[in-house]
Image (cartoon, helix red, strand yellow):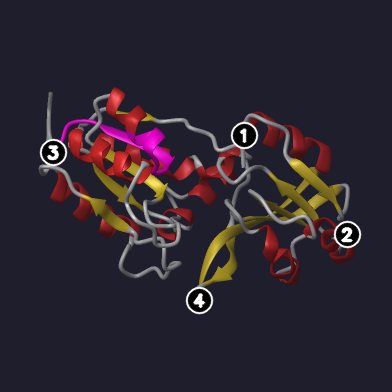
Amino acid sequence: MPKAPLKDIVKHCDRTLRINAIADYDGALNGLQVENNGKVSRIAAAVDASLATVRMAAEQKADLLLVHHGLFWNPQQPWVGKKRDLIGALVENNMAVYSAHLPLDLHPRLGNNIGLCRALKFTKPKPFFEEHNQHIGLKVNTRLGRDILTKRLKRILGAPPVLVQGGPSVCKKVGIVTGGAGSSITKAADEGVDTFITGEGPHWTGALAEELGINVFYGGHYATETFGVKSLAAHLSKKFRLPWNFVDHPTGL
């Protein structure tokens, strides 16, 4: 089985995703989070780094796990119990972990937002939704019935989205920010969209969306963020001639 140096893969990912140039939340710790013995023979991609996804990747004989949400999102806590099991599973299976959060959300070719945009058959997207002094989302001009958009999202994401019908029945300006941007629907409305697609948001956004006159689709945090890790894994597979697979472990959120 062919192998590639881990350092070459990390260097390529860092450069392609502009890891050091893109600001992110403190817990993201983008880049290589865990190293292995220095060689990679198989790549696994997952939305989240967890004991479950590490074990599933190990079953596939992967020695590099690409994730969107890395190991350090939770508040500091001792590595005991299941946390110890997680470390043990990584070490026992010689598994490296590489994480990319906002750099993978906003990437113009491999990112979550462009992936969902393409799946929805939207064209000519423009930058949208500033976060950490950079645009992380996309917006498009279209003319699409709200019911048709609902059906498309259901087909793409595998489940019906939660829809707050606060805006027009025909969507003309659609903004996309995958993940958990629901609490920022005011920002989305201020940027002129009449329809906002994201993963999840708090309960109070239902009434707010009606007051703002904006449709909000909640497609699921997990479901809207599978695109990036899949695209990155496929890209690396082609460049380094390594097999890859997606480790599907939905959170239900």
Mark 1–mark 3 distance (CA, rounded to whole Å): 33 Å
In this picture, which residue range is highlighted in magenta?
39-54
Q: Which residue is mark 1?
A: 157
In which quarter of the view is residue 140 placed? bottom right
Q: Which residue is mark 2?
A: 210
The tag earlier along the polypeptide, 3 or 2, is: 3
The residue sitting at 80% across, 60% down in the picture is 204
Label 1 near label 4: C-beta < 8 Å? no
Q: Residues within 10 Å of mark 1 (few under 14, many from 20)?
A: some
| SS type, badge 3 | strand
Q: Residues within 10 Å of mark 3 (few under 14, many from 20)?
A: some
Q: Residue furthest bottom?
A: 133
The residue sitting at 26% across, 27% down in the picture is 243
Amino acid on which the number 4 mark rests in the picture: Asn
Mark 2–mark 4 distance (CA, rounded to whole Å): 28 Å
Q: Which residue is mark 3?
A: 4
Q: Which residue is mark 4?
A: 133
